[in-house]
Image (tube, rainbow, N blue to C red):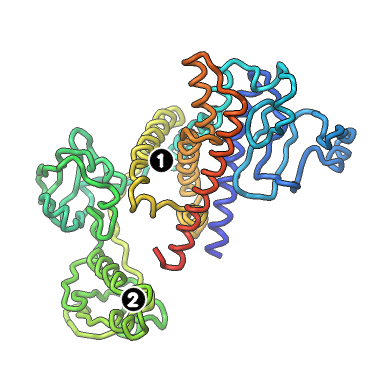
């Protein structure tokens, strides 16, 4: 059921964003009186699932069948709306535009005033950027409406009763377990969020709350975000270790862990909180290679513990699961939360500000794609599915949909032929130089871009498969 809920969320979210993205192109095309032959959700190679050109559909509304021309193509009867069978995106077929929807014979014909290729370069530029603009506007609007509907709930820095946990790199810079990072340079952190790590990467100074006093910690200004996100993380919220419930027949149940129990040592390593335990288990996983024998795996997964229950302490030895877990749920600490309410008109600028921050952060992170770790982090449909929760939550759904809208917009504006950014680049070149690239050049560039995108799609989803089988 969890997987099904994730799949449904992905389909609805991406389907909505594809329609709105293509709707942006459609809107500007119609504004400039450019003919749009097709508007499709998903791709319809060879056949489709539904089309307003289907005769049964036209008869339903009392319309005549669409006649075919000598080449087998349908005569234009207005935009054909439809749903394809290949769920890898969608498209609008704009008449006279050099892309995968136009035949060579069509482009050799005499240009017509309603065609894309006869429009001024600035109009073609807006048509091509219409989808990206729509993505960003949709994201900003969704964020605004989420703030209007649910407000903003957060834990103030001073209310983080257990402080934060830091890795060795952070401690070498001067952070201490229990500190609370309240800002970096001139920026104040209203509350802590993992996204704040991005701000720390280029900061020269961090402000922390330590034992009730504000202390400054010097930073180098060139921290690597991907390294900061590795386990153990540079900084994260500190979580006390207290067992809340135990999974039946799990290693935790076999050694008698119960509600209120805590683990103070693992293989002679002192465990102060749930963060320590998580990091030690992550380290143990790295000690089991992909080709490990059963005996090697059993040796690593057999651990000794010190368990505290009330005032009593006892020792135990247990075999962890193949995933190197105990099988218990840790108690979530109850922090005092603050909710900021937004009126409708207050939510609009707040949503734009939040969306702009998400947009600039995502663009900033693109530089990591060209590193080994960044390339390995690239994911496809499984990665997208995993960011959605396993239970239906409308607030999470809309927040993730807004984030995907920003990601879709940024990716599409990249200057790669076959993407909106590639078409826009050629339009900008024409505006600046006054020279239009030849149709032959644009067609060849389109093919290059298409195969490049196909390669990226295969690479991203291959990463997903490798991660799924624990090979990455």
Q: Nearer the viewer, residue 298 or 438?
A: 438
Give the mark nearest the N terminus, 2 or 1.
Answer: 1
Whether 203 is drawn above or below 98: the answer is below
Whether 314 is drawn above or below 129: the answer is below
Q: Position of residue 441 (x, y in %)?
A: 57, 28
Q: Are marks 2 and 1 in contact (CB under 8 Å)?
A: no
Give the quarter of the image for residue 35: top right
The residue that mark 2 highlights is: 326
Residue at the spot x=73%, y=37% of the render? Answer: 81
Q: Position of residue 259 (x, y in %)?
A: 31, 75
Residue at the spot x=22%, y=37% of the render? Answer: 188
Give the quarter of the image for residue 470: bottom left
Look at the numbered disc 2 and give the secondary structure of its residue.
loop
In the image, taking residue 203 as reference, residue 441 lies left or right, namely right
Q: Quadrant of the N terminus?
A: bottom right
Q: Which mark is residue 62?
A: none
Total numbered labels: 2
Residue at the spot x=13%, y=51% of the render? Answer: 175
């Amino acid at each position: 059921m969890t997987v099904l809920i994730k799949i449904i969320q992905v389909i609805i979210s991406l389907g909505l964003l594809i329609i709105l993205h293509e709707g942006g192109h459609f809107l500007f095309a119609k504004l400039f009186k450019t003919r749009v032959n097709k508007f499709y959700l998903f791709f319809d190679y060879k056949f489709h699932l539904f089309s307003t050109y289907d005769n049964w559909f036209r008869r339903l509304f009392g319309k005549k069948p669409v006649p075919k021309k000598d080449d087998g193509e349908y005569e234009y009867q207005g935009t054909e709306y439809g749903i394809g069978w290949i769920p890898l995106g969608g498209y609008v077929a704009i008449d006279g535009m050099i892309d995968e929807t136009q035949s060579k014979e069509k482009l050799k014909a005499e240009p017509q005033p309603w065609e894309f290729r006869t429009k001024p370069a600035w109009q073609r530029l807006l048509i091509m950027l219409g989808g990206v603009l729509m993505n960003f506007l949709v994201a900003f609007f969704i964020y605004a409406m989420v703030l209007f509907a649910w407000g903003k709930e957060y834990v103030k820095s001073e209310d983080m009763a257990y402080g934060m946990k830091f890795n060795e790199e952070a401690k070498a810079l001067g952070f201490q377990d229990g500190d609370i990072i309240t800002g970096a340079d001139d920026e104040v952190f209203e509350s802590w969020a993992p996204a704040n790590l991005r701000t720390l990467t280029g900061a020269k100074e961090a402000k922390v709350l330590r034992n009730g006093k504000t202390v400054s910690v010097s930073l180098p200004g060139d921290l690597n975000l991907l390294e900061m996100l590795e386990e153990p993380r540079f900084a994260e919220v500190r979580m006390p270790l207290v067992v809340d419930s135990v999974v039946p027949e799990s290693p935790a149940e076999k050694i008698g862990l119960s509600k209120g129990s805590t683990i103070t040592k693992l293989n002679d390593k002192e465990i102060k909180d749930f963060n320590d335990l998580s990091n030690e288990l992550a380290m143990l996983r790295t000690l089991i290679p992909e080709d490990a024998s059963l005996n090697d795996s059993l040796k690593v997964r057999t651990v000794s513990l010190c368990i505290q229950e009330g005032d009593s302490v006892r020792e135990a030895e247990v075999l962890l699961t193949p995933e190197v877990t105990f099988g218990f749920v840790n108690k979530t600490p109850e922090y005092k939360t603050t909710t900021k309410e937004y009126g409708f008109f207050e939510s609009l600028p707040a949503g734009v500000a939040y969306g702009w921050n998400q947009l600039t952060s995502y663009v900033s992170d693109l530089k990591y794609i060209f590193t080994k770790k960044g390339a390995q982090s690239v994911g496809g449909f499984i990665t997208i599915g995993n960011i959605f929760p396993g239970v239906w939550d409308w607030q999470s759904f809309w927040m993730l949909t807004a984030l995907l809208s920003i990601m879709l917009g940024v990716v599409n504006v990249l200057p790669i032929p076959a993407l909106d950014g590639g078409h826009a680049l050629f339009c900008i070149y024409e505006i600046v130089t006054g020279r239009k690239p030849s149709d032959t050049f644009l067609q060849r560039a389109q093919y290059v871009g298409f195969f490049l995108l196909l390669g990226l799609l295969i690479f991203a989803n291959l990463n997903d498969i490798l991660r799924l089988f624990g090979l990455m």
